[in-house]
Amino acid sequence: RIPPGLRVVELSPEDDAERLAFEKSDAAAMGKHLLIRYPHTDNVEWELQKAAALEKAEQLWQLNCARAPWGCAWFSRWKANIDRAKELQQTLYISYFEGQVGAGRLSWDELHVEEARHCAAKA
């Protein structure tokens, strides 16, 4: 399993500096740790690098309050779907991860308040 805070890239001899630059830029934009396997990397070296990268990714995951590192581009579509479901008088259900029932509840008006979000994340 590759944790959300890790981006693994295996380069081939045909890959160029442009691909490498893209992968570095993409990982940085997503807040991920980048692990690159170059063609000359042997298996022992790769396993050592992978172990260190998994540890780093776990640290990033914890620093980000166990949230995925990517942004919220999906949010406007999700909100539109919620609004449409309400218009159609559909019943909305909430699913929680095990052990987190009711944790982190915020009112809609509190979502933009960083302190409220931070406190909810700790709940």
Image (cartoon, grey):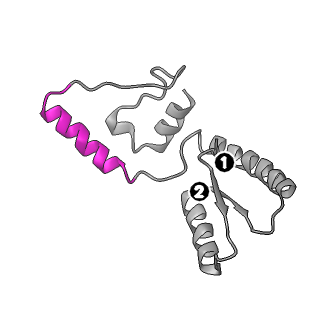
Neighbour tally class for label 1: few under 14, some 14-19, many 20 plus, Cα within 10 Å: many
Q: Earlier in the sequence, mark 2 or mark 1?
A: 2
* Residue 34 picture location, percent across and down: 67, 60
38 in magenta:
no
88 lies left or right of 100? left
Q: Which mark is residue 100?
A: none
Camera-nearest residue between 26 and 103: 26
According to the image, label 2 marks what residue?
31
* Residue 120 picture location, percent across and down: 50, 31
45 lies left or right of 4? right
Q: Residue, x 63% and y 68% (percent of image)?
A: 24
Quarter of the N terminus within the rendering? top right
Query: Which contiguous range is marked in magenta?
Result: 73-90
Q: Quadrant of residue 64?
A: top right
Q: Compared with residue 23, is residue 92 higher up or lower down, i.e. above or below?
A: above
According to the image, label 1 marks what residue?
60
80 in magenta:
yes
The total of numbered circles placed on residues is 2
Identify the amino acid type marked 2.
Gly
Q: Residue, x 48% and y 38% (percent of image)?
A: 117
10 lies left or right of 123? right
SS category of the residue bearing label 2: loop
Q: Residue, x 40% and y 31% (percent of image)?
A: 106
Q: Residue, x 68% and y 48% (percent of image)?
A: 57
Identify the amino acid type marked 1.
Leu
Q: Quadrant of residue 66?
A: top right
CB of mark 2 within 8 Å of CB of mark 1? yes
* Residue 121 picture location, percent across and down: 53, 34
Neighbour tally class for label 2: few under 14, some 14-19, many 20 plus, Cα within 10 Å: many
Magenta segment's dominant SS is helix
In 3D space, how far apart are the residues under numbered discs 2 and 1 (Cα atoms)?
8 Å
SS category of the residue bearing label 1: helix
